[in-house]
Image: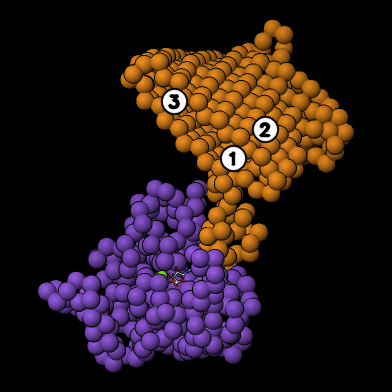
Amino acid sequence: MLKLENLCMTVNGDNGQGREIIRGLNLEFEKGKIYAITGPNGGGKTSIAKLVMGIFKPNSGHIYLNDEEITNLSISDRAHRGITYAFQQPPRFKGLTIEDMIKIARPGIDQLALRGAMRDVGLCPEDYLVRDVGPGLSGGEMKRVEIAQVLARNAKVTIFDEPEAGVDLWTIQKLIGILYNKFKDNPESITIIITHNENILRICDEIMVIQNGLVQARGTREEIWHLIKDDVECKMKEQCGELLTYEI
Amino acid sequence: MKFDNLSLDLLNTISNLTEIPDGAANIRVDGQAVVRSSSANVTITPREDGQGFILEVKPGTIGETVHVPVLITQTGLQETVANTFIIGENSDIIIIAGCGIHNPSHSDSRHDGVHEFIVKPGARLKYIEKHYGQGQGKGKRIMNPTTKINLQSGASAEMEMTQIKGVDDTVRLTTAHIEDKASLKIVERLMTDGEQAAESDVQLNIVGRGGSGQILSRSVARDKSIQVFRAALVGRVECTGHVECDSIIMDNARISSIPELVAEDSEAVLTHEAAIGKIAGEQLIKLMSLGLTEQEAIDVILDGFLR
Ligand SMILES: Nc1ncnc2c1ncn2[C@@H]1O[C@H](COP(=O)(O)OP(=O)(O)O)[C@@H](O)[C@H]1O
Ligand SMILES: [Mg+2]
């Protein structure tokens, strides 16, 4: 189990004063389940992922993985404990190829598995294996490489940050199938997907709505779908007037 | 000819050779050509003063690889060598050069090499050169290569010059004269550390219509090392040229990158990009999240960048 306890995090705001972006967060994630984290932009979703990976340090609170406190462990140590995170905006590397990156993600991976991981995200190995993870790849291609790395790791805790962003519809549909097959009811893994994609939400066991650094709602898709829908409709009306009706 | 282990190691580092290669080759060790062999299509003859050779490739020679490495293991040796490479019409050839210095002593070792390339019409040349130094002493390992390239009508050349480790002081001068429809690509890779200094000065003159020139430089400066890079493209006629200088700066190093474009014709299209920056924090974090330590992440990023 992955457990976040009373997490608070403050960043330097634009006005030079501290701004609390995670405000007393309590969350538990169990093995064998796929969780979705959704909610408006700027709500704190990515910050939660970075806190779990150790990229951000909380000002207070604790993080536990299977009863071991990992709050003060380094990023690398958490990676070795089995946590992996697919970045929302993965950085580029001049001179490193897609093959290099997947081999770093999974040392000793054989060619068959390597090529399989690439095909899973719709990257044909013949065309992409030796391409640089540099300025020559599009945003969507970068996302696919990022997801391939994380899938190759076979981690205990896998966090995806908006895997759908910039990725074409065909690949998303295929990816959803792969996430489903790999993680659904897999007793060994905890899967957390930060997403706005309705089809991804459908394969998740539980959805958490994060807003203003707090959990606003939590439940199955059926339980909380009306909340999201009402909230979005309400915002649309505020912003666009009654004329616009928005179907989600 | 038998090499000692030290020479073999150096040879392997600069040219991936584990034995004396077949075909045409010239291996110079401590001021002497210890191997000099010609093939049916490639002849290597000594200069009159003995300090260098003339290598001639017959027109139409396709697919030969020639090795011309230089090793210095004798302490304090200082030498100046001039070599000429004449690549015959419509041939296609690979030349692998390189210089390795092992200097364990307290006096300086120095190799100054002048390489002149005459690439005849329609010929293609790939030239690979690695510079490397090793040894614990206080004596410096110095290399000052001068490269002159003459690309005739429709010829093309790709020159890869790498200096990754152990060269304390270097001044590299490269000039090229590019005729009509000829194309030249120069790829430089440079890493300096400690108190090393490296200066590279490249000037491409494109004098023939439809000529093209490219300079791609990547460098890493660590510790207190200093790098100065000047890259000039001169377009006298309708032509294209591009300069790209990309550097990673670390610790207390200093890098100056000075690109220059000179167009003397309204049909000359010349561009440059130059960037100097440290390793991005996001890159380190990404690799650490895949399980690397910070130091491993730095090494992976630098190796990739200089590849
Ligand atoms: N390193 C940072 N420095 C300052 N502000 C940050 C930093 N990271 C995130 N924020 C702010 O924290 C809030 C939450 O960000 P984030 O977790 O990225 O939101 P989400 O992923 O839900 O869109 C945003 O207002 C964002 O601007
Ligand atoms: Mg986000």
- Return the residue found at the far left: A243
Residue located at (26% from left, 71% from top): A173
Q: Earlier in the sequence, mark 1 or mark 3?
A: 3
Residue located at (23% from left, 72% from top): A239
Q: Position of residue B1 (x, y in %)?
A: 74, 28
Rendered shade, chain B: orange
In the figure, residue B237 lies in which quadrant?
A: top left
Q: Position of residue A34 (x, y in %)?
A: 38, 84
Protein image colouring: by chain
The amino acid type, in three-letter code, at marker 2 is Ala
> Of helix, strand and loop, which one carries label 1?
strand
Q: Which residue is mark 2?
A: B198
Rendered shade, chain A: purple
Q: Image height check: is B191 above or below B262?
A: below
Q: Are marks 1 and 2 on the same chain?
A: yes
Q: Which residue is mark 1?
A: B219
Q: CA distance from mark 1 to mark 2?
A: 10 Å
The amino acid type, in three-letter code, at marker 1 is Ser
Q: What label sits on residue A106 in the rendered view?
A: none
